[in-house]
Image: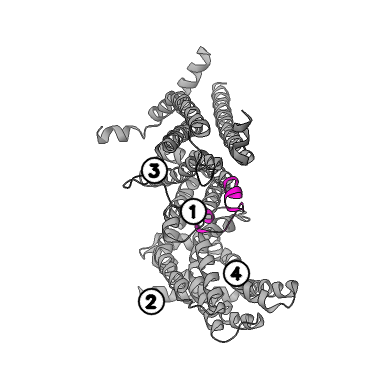
Amino acid sequence: MMKVLRIIFLKDLKVSLRRWSDLLTSFILFVLVCLIFPLTLGNDPSLLLKIIGPVMLVAALLATLLAMQNIFRPDVLNGSLEQLTLNTYPLTLIICTKIFSFWAITSLPLILISGFIASSYYVTGNSILIVILTLLLSTPSLVHISALAAALTVAIRYPGALMALIIIPLSLPIMIFGAKAIEFSISGIDASAPLYFLLGMMFFTCSLGPVVTAAAIKISID
Amino acid sequence: MNLKSIYKLGSPPLFYKLCIVLEPWFLISSILLIAVGMYGGLFVAPPDYQMGDAFRIIYFHVPSAYVSMMAYVYMATSAIIGLIWRSNVAFSLAKSCAPIGASFTFLALITGMLWGKPMWGTAWVWDARLTSELILLFLYLAYIMLHLSIPDRSKADRATALLAIVGVVNIPIIHYSVVWWNTLHQASTISKFAKPSIATEMLWPLIIMILGYTLLFAAFLAKRTAAELAVREKRTRWLQTLIVGDKNNA
Amino acid sequence: MPDIFAMDGYGFYVWGSVLVSIAVLIINWITAHKKFKSTINEVKSFISKGKE
C-alpha cells in the first residue's frame, strides 16, 4: 500500500515539475500580490504592519486557487484518474497523496519566501516566525478545500470563477484566524489561540477533505 | 405513520400531487399569519425601553434569518437523502430550496443592516454572526452556480449535494457565534429550555411571524419543487395524463 | 397617525424593512409562479411534439 502511495506521490511530483511554468506562475502571483500593496500604499510602516496578515493570506489563497486548477483536470483528460477510481486501492488515500504532493510543490515555496516578504513589510524578530508558522498551518487547509472545489468542477468544460466561488466561503474561517494570528504577534500579544484554531482546522480539513474529494471525483467522472 | 408512508413520499406522482394540493393552503395560511403578526408587531406591541420603536424590525429580521438557516439544513438533508437513495424527489427539493433560501438570507442581511444603522451607528460590522450569515449567502450562490454549470443532470445533483453537505458546517457556526465569541450582535432571546428574555406582548407576534415565514417558505418550495419534478418526469405517463387532462379541463 | 409613520424617529428604518421584506417575498412568489407556468408550458409543448 505504501509503495503504491509513494509511486503516486513521486509521479505527481515529476509531472508537476514538468509543468514548472504553471508553478512559477502561482509563485510569482503570490510574490506580486504581496508586493503590490507596499508599492501602492506608500512607505508607512504602521499601515504595512496592520495589513500584512490579511495580505499574506489572501495572496496564499489566490496562489493556491490558481495552482490547484491543474490537480485533477489533466488526469481526467488523459484517463488515468478514471483508472485510479476503478482499482482496489482506496481512492481516499490516493487523493490524499496527490493533494499532499501538490501542497509540497505549490505551497512550500510560498512558505519559504514568506519570511522575506514579511521582513519587507517591516516585520521583525519573533513575528516573522509566526508569519511562517501561520502560512505553514493554513496552506494545508486551503489546499484541501481547493482540491474539493477542483473535484466538483472537473466535469465542467469552462469553469471560470466557479472554483473561487466555492473556495472563498469555505476558507473564510482560515483566513480570519490566520490574519488574527499575525496581527496578534505583531502587536505583541500571545498568538497561540488563533494558531491552535488553525491547527484544528488543518486536522479537520486534512482528515475529512480527501474523503469528500474522493466522493466528488467519483461523481464527476462517473 | 410507519416507514412505508415515508418511502411513499419518494414517489414522484404522489409528491407532485401533494405539492400542487398543499401549496394554496400554505400560501393562504402564511399570508394570514404574517398579516396578524405584522399588525401585532408594528402596532400592538409596546416600544422597547432601550431601542424605542426600531426594535420592531425584529419581526422581519429574526423570521427571515431563521428561515434562511432552516432552508439550508433542509437543503442539506434532502441532498443526503438524494445521494443515499438516488431519489429524484429529494434532489428536486434540494435544488428548489436554494434560490428561496438565498433570498431569505439576503432579506435577513438587509433588515439586519437597516436595524444596525440606527442601533449601532453602522450598517455593517465584521463580527462572527454577520460574517457567517454572509458566508451562507455565498454558499447558496455557489450551489446555484454549480448546478447551472454542470450540464448532466444527475451529475449536477450529486456534485451540488456534496457541496451542500460540506457547507452545513456553517450553520452551527452562525447559531453559536453569539455564544462562542463576544460579538456586537445580541445573544438569543428565545431558547428551548430557558424562559425567553423578552416580554410576552412582544413575543407572540414574533412567534406568529416565524410560523408565517416558515409556511411561506413551504409554499414557495412546493411550487418550485412541483415545477422541477415536472421537468424531470416529463416523459412519464402519469405526468403527461395529468397535464393533458388539465388542458382538456381548463 | 403620523406617530405610527414616524416610529419615534426610526420611521425610515422600520418601514424600510417592512417594504423590503414584502417586496422580496412578493418577488419570490412571482418567480416561483412564473417558473411553474413556464415548465408546464414546456412539458405541454414536449407532449404535443411527441404526438406529431
Q: What element carries label 1?
A: helix
- Label 2 vs label 4: CA separation? 40 Å
Quarter residue B210 falls in: top left
Mark 2 and mark 3 on one chain? no
Dot 3: few (<14), some (14–19), or many (≥20) neighbours within 10 Å?
some
In terms of depth relative to the viewer, which is nearer, B250 or A200? Answer: A200
Please state which of the two labelled residues, at mark 2 or mark 3, is closer to the viewer: 3
Mark 4 belongs to which subunit?
A: A
Relative to A82, say whether A189 is above or below.
below
Please state which of the two labelled residues, at mark 2 or mark 1, is closer to the viewer: 1
Q: What residue type is labelled 3?
A: Arg
- Label 2 vs label 3: CA separation? 36 Å
Dot 2: few (<14), some (14–19), or many (≥20) neighbours within 10 Å?
few
Q: What residue type is labelled 1?
A: Ser
For disc 2, the marked residue is A3
Residue at horizontal 58 percent and vertical 55 percent from the top: A165
Quarter the N terminus of chain C occupies: top right
Residue at horizontal 54 percent and vertical 29 percent from the top: C36
Query: From the viewer's perspective, is B172 left or right of C15?
Result: left
Q: Please provide the residue range marked out in magenta.
A: B114-131
How many numbered circles are shown? 4
Mark 2 belongs to which subunit?
A: A
Mark 1 belongs to which subunit?
A: A
For disc 3, the marked residue is B86
Q: Which of marks 4 and 1 is nearer the N terminus?
A: 4
- Label 2 vs label 1: CA separation? 27 Å
For disc 4, the marked residue is A54
For disc 1, the marked residue is A220
Relative to C16, say whether A134 is above or below.
below
